[in-house]
C-alpha cells in the first residue's frame, strides 16, 4: 500500500516532476532528478504504465479491427493522464485504478 505520510516539503518539491510524469516519456525526469522523492517516484511509476499503454495502443492502431479499440483506449489513457496530473498537483498519492495496481508491482 502507499505510504500517505509524506513530508509537506517533499510533496512540494516533487509535485512539478510528478505532474510531468504523466506527459509522454517525461517520467524519466522524476527518476533522474528526484530519485529519492517518494511522491515524484509514485507518480512516475504510474506515468510509466500509461506511457507503455499508449505505445502499445499506437502499435495496435495499425491492425484493422484492433485500431479502433486501440484508439479508444488511447483516448481513455489521455483522460487518465489528466487525472494523474490533477492528483499530483493537489498533493495526493491516490493510486489510479488499474494503473496504480500495475505501477505498485514495478521494480524501478
Image (cartoon, rainbow, N blue to C red):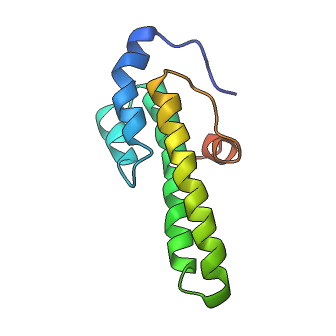
Seen in the picture, residue 64 relative to 36 is either above or below; the reply is below
Seen in the picture, residue 93 relative to 46 is either above or below; the reply is above
- Whether residue 65 can be seen here: yes
Placement of the N terminus among the 4 image quadrants: top right
Total label count?
A: 0
- Looking at this rendering, what residue extends furthest in the left direction? 33
Where residue 81 appears, x then y in whole percent?
Answer: 51, 46
- Looking at this rendering, what residue extends furthest in the bottom direction? 64
Where residue 8 appears, x then y in whole percent?
Answer: 44, 10
Where residue 101 appears, x then y in whole percent?
Answer: 69, 43
**Quadrant of residue 15 in the image?**
top left
Identify the residue at horizontal 38%, vertical 11% (top origin): 9
Identify the residue at horizontal 45%, vertical 45% (top origin): 22
Identify the residue at horizontal 61%, vertical 72% (top origin): 70
Observer-nearest residue: 34 or 90? 90
- Whether residue 108 can be seen here: no
* Left or right: 24 in relation to 102: left
Observer-nearest residue: 55 or 1? 55
Identify the residue at horizontal 62%, vertical 67% (top origin): 72
Where residue 76 appears, x then y in whole percent?
Answer: 60, 56
Amino acid at each position: 500500500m502507499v505510504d500517505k505520510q509524506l513530508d509537506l516539503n517533499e510533496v512540494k518539491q516533487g509535485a512539478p516532476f510528478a505532474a510531468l510524469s504523466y506527459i509522454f516519456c517525461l517520467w524519466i525526469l522524476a527518476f533522474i532528478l528526484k530519485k529519492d522523492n517518494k511522491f515524484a517516484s509514485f507518480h512516475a511509476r504510474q506515468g510509466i504504465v500509461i506511457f507503455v499503454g499508449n505505445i502499445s495502443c499506437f502499435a495496435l492502431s495499425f491492425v484493422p479491427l484492433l485500431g479502433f479499440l486501440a484508439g479508444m483506449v488511447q483516448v481513455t489513457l489521455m483522460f487518465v493522464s489528466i487525472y494523474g496530473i490533477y492528483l499530483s498537483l493537489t498533493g495526493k498519492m491516490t493510486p489510479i485504478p488499474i494503473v496504480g495496481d500495475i505501477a505498485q508491482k514495478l521494480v524501478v
